[in-house]
Amino acid sequence: MELVKVVGANLRATRVHRGLSLSEVARRAELGKGTLSELEAGQRNPTLETLYALATVLGVPLGRLLITEADPPVETGLVVRRADEAELPGRAVDVQLVDRTIGGGRTLEIYRIHVRAGNRYVSPAHRPRVIEQLLVHSGTLVTGPESDPETLGPGDYIRFDGGADHVYAATDEDVAGTLVMRYVDEEASAL
């Protein structure tokens, strides 16, 4: 299924499950009600920033809005993600959900991440107890808490608390990496 349709169906299902109106979610996410309606209908391409805002309002990990239920559990089937599958674009950062696992009171989401050269993005704080882990494959990346970021090169790794504002900035060339988001799982009981 096309990403825009998957996101729309997941947004609507999560909003309805939470018992929230379209108007309330739009207001809390600082979006127009028409924009949210178009997103839920699969008629508008979402940006990474918009989906992070909606995931925060809905109290779910970003990956919950990107998954299809077609993926079999790892014990029962093979899942392959191709590099050319749809990315979720942002102003400075693009991501592609590679895998999502729920168990043991945690949700782990693995993303391919691409930060475009000369761009800087400040990600607002996620909900409490979200850990971000990032491995840089190519390029130079400035990342970590906005108040004290680190400069990383190929092969460098960082882990930080995503519960505070944090930055992703590519200096003079594009950056490719792997991002793992680790959530203490409130989702398992909520969904």
Image (cartoon, rainbow, N blue to C red):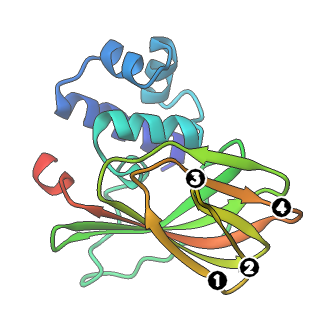
Image side of residue 55 versus residue 184, left or right:
right
What residue appears at the point 26 percent right and 17 percent down from the top-left corner?
21
Observer able to see residue 82? no
What residue appears at the point 60 percent right and 50 percent down from the top-left corner?
88
Residue hosting label 2: 153
Q: Earlier in the sequence, mark 4 or mark 2?
A: 2
Q: Which mark is residue 25?
A: none
Do the CB atoms of the residues marked 1 and 2 lie less than 8 Å apart?
Answer: yes
Residue hosting label 1: 156
What residue appears at the point 23 percent right and 67 percent down from the top-left corner?
106
Helix, strand, or loop for circle 4? Answer: loop
Q: Rounded to the nearest whole Å, what is the CA distance between mark 3 and mark 2? A: 20 Å
Q: Rounded to the nearest whole Å, what is the CA distance between mark 1 and mark 2? A: 6 Å
Q: Rounded to the nearest whole Å, what is the CA distance between mark 1 and mark 3? A: 20 Å
Q: Which mark is residue 147?
A: 3
Do the CB atoms of the residues marked 3 and 2 lie less than 8 Å apart?
Answer: no
Question: Splitting the image into 4 quarters, where does residue 150 fall?
Answer: bottom right
User: What is the x, y in percent for residue 190?
Assistant: 14, 46
Helix, strand, or loop for circle 3? Answer: loop
User: What is the x, y in percent for residue 80?
Assistant: 49, 77
Q: Is residue 12 above or below residue 137?
A: above
Neighbours of disc 3 within 10 Å: few (<14), some (14-19), many (20+):
few
What amino acid type should be assigned to the residue bearing mark 3?
Answer: Ser
What amino acid type should be assigned to the residue bearing mark 4?
Answer: Thr
Do the CB atoms of the residues marked 3 and 4 lie less than 8 Å apart?
Answer: no
Helix, strand, or loop for circle 2? Answer: loop
